[in-house]
Image (cartoon, rainbow, N blue to C red):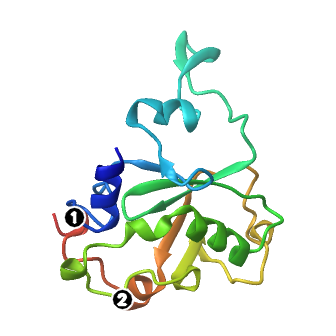
């Protein structure tokens, strides 16, 4: 696994600088490691049960883990400990420390400078770009939120999707 991670961090695999391709993969920023595909449903609490059935059909129950938030970046889900009373800057720093830079594409595929520091990230919730000094709760982000975006600010400012984005398909 170490050789694969070294190759991924060097940008040697398709789909980006990490071992994930667009629309695939998950990363645990607290442990700085990949979440295996077979564990994703468990980690992200997406296993349907009969706890709250709908017309006899199992459904996914409400989340219980309110200590972790999930951010989508470059087709990968990044799980990180974060709370609504944290500032956007603190969350960005936790994502950076946990390995979100692995979402950078290999240099020959980059159309922007890439993530060079946590300051290159923009966090988005409910179409609102979060300011560094403001707390997530100012944007009404609930505990355990799993539907946020982390995007390279340069990509956001360019106003256009990547040339290899699914947008063009």
Q: Is residue 35 above or below residue 78?
A: above
Q: Is residue 85 left or right of residue 60?
A: right
Q: Is residue 92 above or below residue 71?
A: below
Q: CA distance from mark 1 to mark 2?
A: 18 Å
What is the quadrant of the N terminus in the image?
top left
- What residue is shown with label 2? 113
- How many labels sit on residues? 2
Mark 1 / mark 2, whichever is N-terminal = 1
Q: Is residue 53 above or below residue 81?
A: above
The percent position of residue 141, horizontal first and vertical second, equals 72, 61
Element on which disc 1 rests: loop
The percent position of residue 87, horizontal first and vertical second, equals 77, 74
Callout 1: 10 Å neighbours few (<14), some, many (20+)?
some
Q: Are marks 1 and 2 in contact (CB under 8 Å)?
A: no
Occupied quadrant, residue 42: top right
Occupied quadrant, residue 21: bottom left
Residue at the image position 77 percent from the left and 84 percent from the top: 133
- What residue is shown with label 1? 12
The percent position of residue 126, horizontal first and vertical second, equals 60, 66
Q: Is residue 11 above or below residue 122?
A: above
What is the quadrant of the C terminus in the image?
bottom left
Q: Is residue 143 left or right of residue 120?
A: right
Q: Is residue 94 left or right of residue 25?
A: right
């Amino acid at each position: 696994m170490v050789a694969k991670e070294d190759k991924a961090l060097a940008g040697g695999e398709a789909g980006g600088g990490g071992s994930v391709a667009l629309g695939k993969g998950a990363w645990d920023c607290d442990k700085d490691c990949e979440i295996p595909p077979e564990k994703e449903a468990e980690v992200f609490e997406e296993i349907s049960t009969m706890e709250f059935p709908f017309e006899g059909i199992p459904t996914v129950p409400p989340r219980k883990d309110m200590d972790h938030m999930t951010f989508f970046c470059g087709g990968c889900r990044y799980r990180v400990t974060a709370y609504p009373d944290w500032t956007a800057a603190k969350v960005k720093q936790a994502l950076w420390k946990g390995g979100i830079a692995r979402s950078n594409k290999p240099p020959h595929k980059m159309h922007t400078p890439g993530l060079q520091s946590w300051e290159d990230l923009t966090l988005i919730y409910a179409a609102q770009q979060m300011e560094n000094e403001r707390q997530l709760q100012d944007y009404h982000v609930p505990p355990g939120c799993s539907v946020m975006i982390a995007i390279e600010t340069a990509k956001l400012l360019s106003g256009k999707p990547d040339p290899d984005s699914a947008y063009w398909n």
